[in-house]
Image (spheres, rainbow, N blue to C red):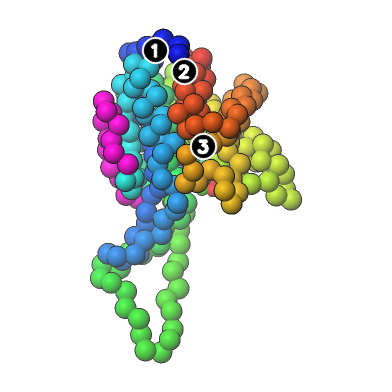
Amino acid sequence: RGSQPLLQDLAGRRVVVSAGGTREFLDPVRFIGNRSSGRQGYALARAAVVRGASVTLIAANVTLPAPAGVTVTSVVSTRDLRDAVLEAAQHADAVVMAAAPADFRPRTYTDHKIKKTDDRSAPTVELVQNPDILAELSHDRPRKDLVVAGFAAETGDAEGSVLTHGRTKLARKGCDLLVVNEVGADKGFESTDNEAVILGTDGSETVVPHGSKDALAHRIWDLVAERW
Ligand code: CTP
Ligand code: CA
């Protein structure tokens, strides 16, 4: 927003942002996780606070300091995240799912450390699918004017381009906005910069050029605010 005066255009709005990556424990010391740092979610929370919103940040395994003026709820697993997001969404005007929930969890949790055996064998970990929080919230909205946004990190493949996959995902999830990032070796994860296309259910495609996660966060709130 550079030299522009700070607009309190989100004043009076309650927003929920999820951030980080969930962990699914196999035993007390081991988990299945992912590389999400939580930076984009934290940037969204900061940007919303600056613009006057009341912000609840639901953080999964994030090591960043809590942004000033933000209520942070910590969660571990995708099911914890689901409970916290659905609860916070009851009183929210917008929910942005910037977290990377683990899609699968081990079918069983072993309450002691799994030990090696001498026969060089290895256990087989059976996985089950986790709930899809974004789809559930979008299809079963606690308030009809709730705006819901998600993220999708995609690569192009033989089935289609990054944006084709993004459109398909937007339709499947049922959210209003989907922020599509192209991921590759040095794009997206664990970087401070991001570039994205924000797809809307109204057919809109907002290209956000290479820039900071803060700049992307502000564009996302612009588009959320337009939908209120
Ligand atoms: N998401 C969610 N609950 C899940 C998985 C994902 O709410 N169990 C949300 C993410 O926070 C993100 C969006 O859905 O906002 C897209 O996540 P992504 O992993 O790209 O979608 P998936 O449906 O899991 O599809 P994929 O098989 O491509 O991982
Ligand atoms: Ca996924």
Rendered view: 21 above or below 138: below
Q: Position of residue 116 (x, y in %)?
A: 35, 81
The tag earlier along the polypeptide, 3 or 2, is 2
Contact between marks 1 and 2 (CB within 8 A): the answer is: yes
Q: Which residue is mark 3?
A: 193
C-alpha distance separating marks 1 and 2: 8 Å
Bounds of the magenta span?
Answer: 64-77
The vertical placement of 1 against 121, above or below, is: above
Q: Earlier in the sequence, mark 1 or mark 2?
A: 2
Marks 1/3 in contact by CB < 8 Å: the verdict is no
Callout 2 amino acid: Arg
Q: Amino acid at mark 1?
A: Leu
Residue count near mark 2 (Cα–Cα under 10 Å), binned few <14, some 14–19, many ≥20: few
Residue 196: percent from left, percent from top: 58, 33
| Residue positioned 41% across, 55% down in the render | 33
Name the element at disc 1: loop
Snapshot quadrant of residue 181: top right
Q: CA distance from mark 3 to mark 2?
A: 16 Å
The answer to whether 131 appears left or right of 161 in the picture is left
Residue indicated by mark 1? 6
> Dot 2: what SS?
loop
Mark 3 belongs to which amino acid? Asp
Q: Which mark is residue 223?
A: none
Q: Viewer-proximal residue, 166 or 138?
A: 166
**Residue identifier under label 2:** 1
Q: State the separation of the CA atoms marked 1 and 3.
A: 23 Å
Does the magenta segment cover residue 75?
yes
Relative to 197, 17 lies left or right: left
The residue located at (59%, 51%) in the rendering is 185
**Residue 58, percent across and down?**
33, 37
> Would residue 221 be visible to someone looking at this image?
yes
Q: Is the stretch drawn in magenta largely helix, strand or loop?
A: loop
